[in-house]
Image (spheres, rainbow, N blue to C red):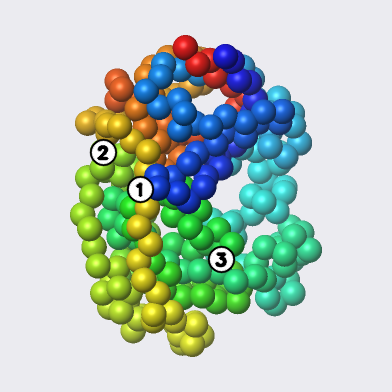
């Protein structure tokens, strides 16, 4: 069986364990069902997620032209503290920016390789945690817009990490942490504007991933360089496919690539 389509991040369902799906234009693939099987991934061409052109992907699934023009790739996406829609100030498209920025956002702690702070729209909980490969997470602040979430994250970065060590996450080098203790310890550093939105009664969410075995030395697959790869799928964690030979493939970082996937 061969499936062909443009890669976008895997869709997930919060189950025990998490269920993963690759969604193409005319088909979808339940990736969990491929665990234990040999699959071949082959690069076919590029397809920008915005304009659909076959120009090389620059970042985030977009060609270079789109990346520097569309609101979905503006700086406030990666840096929420730069959000300005609450001030009625446009960056690239005020209508889009209001739609995304002026809705409830969560500042959270997640533990994948270490405890880190992050920001996501409330509607993306727990999807965001799953995508990061976190085995436990907790909400600490729920604010009405992206700007307040951003300045809270910036303030907390001085006291807790804001990055994940992807190799440790994939090797499953885990240390269970009491995130309630972390939350309470960080409360004094939350900006005054966001402090009224502190969540003091939330409990940890635990996440389990469909993995038969973890790589001892993860080796990231560069599909553009190799053009194709074949191996036995042994697990899925975060947005990574894990293979028996220690190869790992980050689906999200390869968005915009048209691939064919053959189940052998």
Classed neighbour count for the residue bearing mark 1: other residues with Cα under 10 Å, few (<14), some (14–19), many (≥20): some
Which numbered disc, 2 or 1, marks the residue that appears first in the sequence? 2
Q: Which label sits on residue 171?
A: 2
Spatial CA distance of label 2 from label 1 is: 14 Å
Name which residue lies at 56% across and 66% down.
122
Residue 148 lies, in percent from the top left, at 54, 75
Q: Is residue 95 visible?
A: yes
Spatial CA distance of label 3 from label 2 is: 29 Å
Residue 64 lies, in percent from the top left, at 66, 37
* Viewer-nearest of discs 2 and 1: 1
User: For this view, does 28 lie left or right of residue 93?
Assistant: left
**Element type at marker 3?**
helix
Which numbered disc, 3 or 1, marks the residue that appears first in the sequence? 3
Classed neighbour count for the residue bearing mark 2: other residues with Cα under 10 Å, few (<14), some (14–19), many (≥20): some
Name which residue lies at 68% across and 33% down.
48
Q: Nearer the viewer, residue 221 or 151?
A: 221
**Element type at marker 2?**
helix
* Residues marked 3 and 1 touching at CB (< 8 Å): no
Label 3 sits on residue: 122
Label 1 sits on residue: 208
Position of 8 relative to 153 (above/below): above
Residue 20 lies, in percent from the top left, at 50, 39
Position of 135 relative to 195 (above/below): above
Name which residue lies at 28% across and 50% down.
113
**Element type at marker 1?**
loop
Spatial CA distance of label 3 from label 1 is: 21 Å
The residue furthest top is 264
Position of 196 relative to 251 (above/below): below
* Viewer-nearest of discs 3 and 1: 1
């Amino acid at each position: 069986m061969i499936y062909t389509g443009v890669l976008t991040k895997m869709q997930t369902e919060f189950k025990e364990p998490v269920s993963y799906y690759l969604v193409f234009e005319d088909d979808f693939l339940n990736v969990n069902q491929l665990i234990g099987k040999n699959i071949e991934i082959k690069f076919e061409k590029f397809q920008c997620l915005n304009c659909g052109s076959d120009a090389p992907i620059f970042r985030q699934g977009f060609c270079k032209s789109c990346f520097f023009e569309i609101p979905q790739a503006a700086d406030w996406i990666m840096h929420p503290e730069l959000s300005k829609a609450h001030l009625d100030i446009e960056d690239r498209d005020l209508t889009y920016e209001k739609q995304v920025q002026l809705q409830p956002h969560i500042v959270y702690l997640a533990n994948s390789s270490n405890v880190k702070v992050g920001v996501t729209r409330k509607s993306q909980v727990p999807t965001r945690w799953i995508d990061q490969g976190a085995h436990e997470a907790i909400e600490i602040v729920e604010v009405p817009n992206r700007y307040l979430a951003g300045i809270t994250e910036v303030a907390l970065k001085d006291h807790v990490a804001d990055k994940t060590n992807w190799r440790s996450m994939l090797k499953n080098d885990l240390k269970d942490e009491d995130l309630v203790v972390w939350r309470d310890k960080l409360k004094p550093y939350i900006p005054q504007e966001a402090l009224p939105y502190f969540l003091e009664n939330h409990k940890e969410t635990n996440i389990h991933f469909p993995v038969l075995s973890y790589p001892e030395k993860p080796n990231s697959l560069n599909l553009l360089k190799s053009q194709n790869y074949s191996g036995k799928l042994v697990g899925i964690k975060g947005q990574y496919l894990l293979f028996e030979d220690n190869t790992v493939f980050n689906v999200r970082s390869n968005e915009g690539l048209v691939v064919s996937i053959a189940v052998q």
